[in-house]
Each structure stands twice: as structure tokens, then as C-alpha cells.
């Protein structure tokens, strides 16, 4: 029997007719971009939902990362993780900054605070950790190091929409946090992103930078970029926000189902505890161990043959790509945990529309080995 392919994630799409009133408003007021009504509404709504005071929308998360570094005037060297999407390190290169890779924690796969201090040099100006799979970094330990060495902290929080810790939004940590609203994320605007700002003055500077550096019609104060979010994307975000809690709850159900179905499979270890109330369940990564009769890559290929397209997030490591592998910090002996994770992690499909029968079929394919 032919089955529709199942991918690791699919965008959450509302009914098309629900979007029509938003489009009609855009056509009626004839404002398509440059901070229009929906742009302003979405910034306010996201601040309320996320529990933050200031937020600047962007056309995508990568431009938000590039601008965050520019806004903080970061130079020299920045300590970051090799276990992430390439945009994390690319944003450094685009700003003329040297990435310095540090190994990750074996449990969270986030930047390991115990390895950071040894990588600090007189040229180090900042730390850029990633909340990998939406699981919070050790923000307290990272901030202590930053304070001791007078370093900035910019969090790549692309996976961390809606994630909280005991005191509130995880996005309030560091000097800036950067979100992605790409189509595959828990909350999306087709393409989009945002920077969480600590105060109004920082947000104003970032708003100038994402609009070429313009302050008014005749005044340009910095070499900014075109990072503005359009009204179409902002309107879609307003519609998406209405159903994001339901979407996260459905992801949690799928997470629980996977854990139950895979709990007795030797060599298959789902990451995380599974019951975190603050989690957004943006991904479902498993570690394929030596007790499993196939390698991770063999399992990946077998699932793909069956129409199940998992993802080896993150493989290869950023540090293995040609533009980075010549750096001293990119040596594999410097990154043993990250290298092991890159060879063992497989992210299984998880998105709100994924049927329970498909979750059961995926689990059965894994058990079949």
C-alpha cells in the first residue's frame, strides 16, 4: 500500500478561509511592509504571550542573529557550539567574527559551561549558546562566566518559542535572545524571526538596524540591513498565535506516545524526560546506541525507504564544514561529545497533524530491527 511520505516536521496551517479577513485588511489599507498595523499587533501580542517586554520582528531568524551581533557591537572571537544549524556560526562570519567551538553537555547537547572558560582568550567578546531542541541551556552558569570575563551573551533560541524555566520565559536570559519563525517551527510566520530586547533603547537601535539604519527619511545612523517582516507574514503570525497552545499540547501527546512505544527497545534512547511542563516539544530526538542492531545511518535509510523522513539533526557538525574545519577549535578531539551526538542522533517526525497510527507505524519500524 502506498503511503504519503512523513517528514520530521510540517508547518501548522490554519484553514485558508480564516486568513481571508487578514488579507482583506492588508489590501484595504494598502500597507504591505515597513512596520504596518499587523507588524505592530504581532510584536505586542508576542510580548504578551512570551512574557517579555520588548521584541523586534524580523523577516527571518538568520538576519535577526546577524543584527543582534551588530547591535551589541560584538567583534573578535565568540564562543559557540558546533552542534547547531549552520546559521548560528554563519552569522558570526558575516560580521567578521571568529567562531570558537566548545563541546556540548552529553545530556542536553547544549554548550557545556565547564568547557567555556578554557576557550576564552583576550580576543573573546561574547558567548553564543543554543537552546538545542528547545531545552534550556545552563543559563545561570553561562551568565556567571560572562560576568566574570565581561562578555556579552546572545542566545540562539530558534527552537525555544514559549519555553520557560522556574522564573519565567527562557528568552529573558542573556543580553539578547533570537527566535526563528521558519515554517517548520512550533510558531511560524512562513518565514520570520525576532530579537528579544532588554529595554526600549535597545529595541530602537535594532529597529533602525533592520531598516538599513534609517532613523527618518534623510538620516541613516548605521550600515543596517533589510530585515523587516512584511504585513503578510505578520498577519499569518497573528492567526497562528491563536492556535499555538493547542499545537504544543498535541506535540506533547505525540512525545508521550513515542516514549511509551519505544521504552523497551534496546539501544534506542529518547532524549529528555518527556514530562517537562515548560517544554514546547519542537523536536523528538532519539540516540541510537550500540545495543541497537543497526547504526543510526542504517536506521535513517531504512525509515526513509518506508517513507519516513527523519533528520540527523545535527549532522555533520558545523565545525566539519569547509569554512570552519580549519579552525583550531574545530578539531574532533576538541569536540568528542558533539561528534558522538552527530553520529547517533535521529529526530523523528513530530508535528500537530501527525496521526497516532503514523506514530505507531514509525515505532514499529524502529522495533522491527
Image (tube, grey):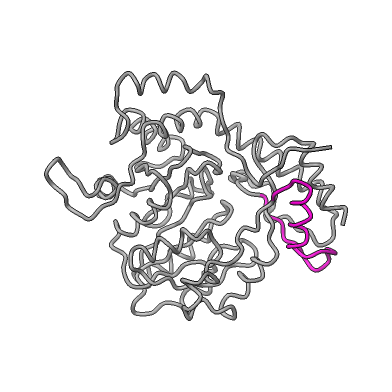
- Quarter of the rendering containing residue 254: top right
Magenta stretch? 284-309
Q: Quadrant of the C terminus?
A: bottom right
Whether the magenta-drawn stretch holds residue 105 is answered as no
* Residue 334 appears left or right of 364: left
Residue at image position (64%, 66%) is 342
Q: For this rendering, which residue is in front, 3 or 329? A: 3
- Quarter of the rendering containing residue 350: top right
Q: For this rendering, which residue is in front, 260 or 28? A: 28
* Residue 258 appears left or right of 228: right
Q: Position of residue 70 (x, y in %)?
A: 30, 59
* Residue 204 appears left or right of 148: left
Whether the magenta-drawn stretch holds residue 306 is answered as yes
Residue at image position (70%, 42%) is 6
Q: For this rendering, which residue is in front, 265 or 320? A: 320
Find the residue positioned furthest to the front.
2
Residue at image position (53%, 73%) is 114
Q: Position of residue 209 (x, y in %)?
A: 26, 50
Find the residue positioned furthest to the right.
368
In this picture, is 347 found above or below 57?
below
Q: For this rendering, which residue is in front, 142 or 38? A: 38
Q: Position of residue 30 (x, y in %)?
A: 29, 24
Amino acid at each position: 500500500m502506498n503511503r504519503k511520505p512523513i517528514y520530521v516536521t510540517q508547518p501548522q496551517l490554519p484553514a485558508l478561509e480564516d486568513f481571508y479577513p487578514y488579507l482583506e485588511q492588508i489590501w484595504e489599507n494598502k500597507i504591505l511592509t515597513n512596520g504596518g498595523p499587523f507588524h505592530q499587533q504581532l510584536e505586542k501580542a508576542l510580548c504578551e504571550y512570551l512574557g517579555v517586554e520588548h521584541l523586534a520582528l524580523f523577516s527571518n531568524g538568520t538576519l535577526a542573529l546577524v543584527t543582534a551581533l551588530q547591535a551589541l557591537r560584538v567583534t573578535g572571537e565568540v564562543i559557540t557550539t558546533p552542534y547547531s544549524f549552520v546559521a548560528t556560526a554563519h552569522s558570526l562570519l558575516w560580521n567578521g567574527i571568529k567562531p570558537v567551538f566548545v563541546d556540548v553537555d552529553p545530556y542536553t547537547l547544549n554548550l557545556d559551561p565547564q568547557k567555556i572558560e578554557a576557550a576564552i582568550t583576550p580576543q573573546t567578546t561574547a558567548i553564543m549558546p543554543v537552546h538545542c531542541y528547545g531545552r534550556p541551556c545552563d543559563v545561570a552558569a553561562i551568565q556567571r562566566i560572562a560576568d566574570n570575563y565581561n562578555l556579552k551573551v546572545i542566545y540562539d533560541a530558534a527552537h525555544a518559542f514559549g519555553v520557560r524555566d522556574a522564573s519565567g520565559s527562557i528568552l529573558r536570559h542573556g543580553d539578547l535572545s533570537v527566535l526563528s519563525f521558519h515554517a517548520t517551527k512550533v510558531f511560524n510566520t512562513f518565514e520570520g524571526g525576532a530579537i528579544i530586547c532588554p529595554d526600549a533603547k535597545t529595541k530602537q537601535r535594532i529597529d533602525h538596524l533592520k531598516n538599513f539604519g534609517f532613523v527618518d527619511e534623510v538620516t541613516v545612523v548605521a550600515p543596517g540591513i533589510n530585515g523587516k517582516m512584511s504585513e503578510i507574514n505578520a498577519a499569518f503570525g497573528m492567526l497562528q498565535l491563536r492556535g499555538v497552545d493547542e499545537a504544543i499540547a498535541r506535540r506533547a501527546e505525540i512525545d508521550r506516545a513515542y516514549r511509551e512505544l519505544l521504552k523497551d527497545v534496546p539501544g534506542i534512547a529518547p532524549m529528555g524526560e518527556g514530562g517537562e511542563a515548560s517544554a514546547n516539544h519542537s523536536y523528538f530526538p532519539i540516540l541510537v546506541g550500540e545495543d541497537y542492531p543497526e547504526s543510526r545511518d542504517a536506521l535513517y535509510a531504512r525509515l526513509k525507504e518506508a517513507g519516513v523522513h527523519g533528520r540527523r539533526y545535527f549532522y555533520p557538525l558545523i565545525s566539519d564544514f569547509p569554512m570552519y574545519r580549519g579552525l583550531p577549535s574545530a578539531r574532533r578531539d576538541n569536540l568528542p561529545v558533539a561528534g558522538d551526538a552527530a553520529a547517533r542522533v535521529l529526530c523523528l517526525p513530530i508535528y500537530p497533524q501527525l496521526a497516532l497510527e503514523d506514530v505507531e507505524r514509525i515505532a514499529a519500524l524502529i522495533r522491527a530491527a
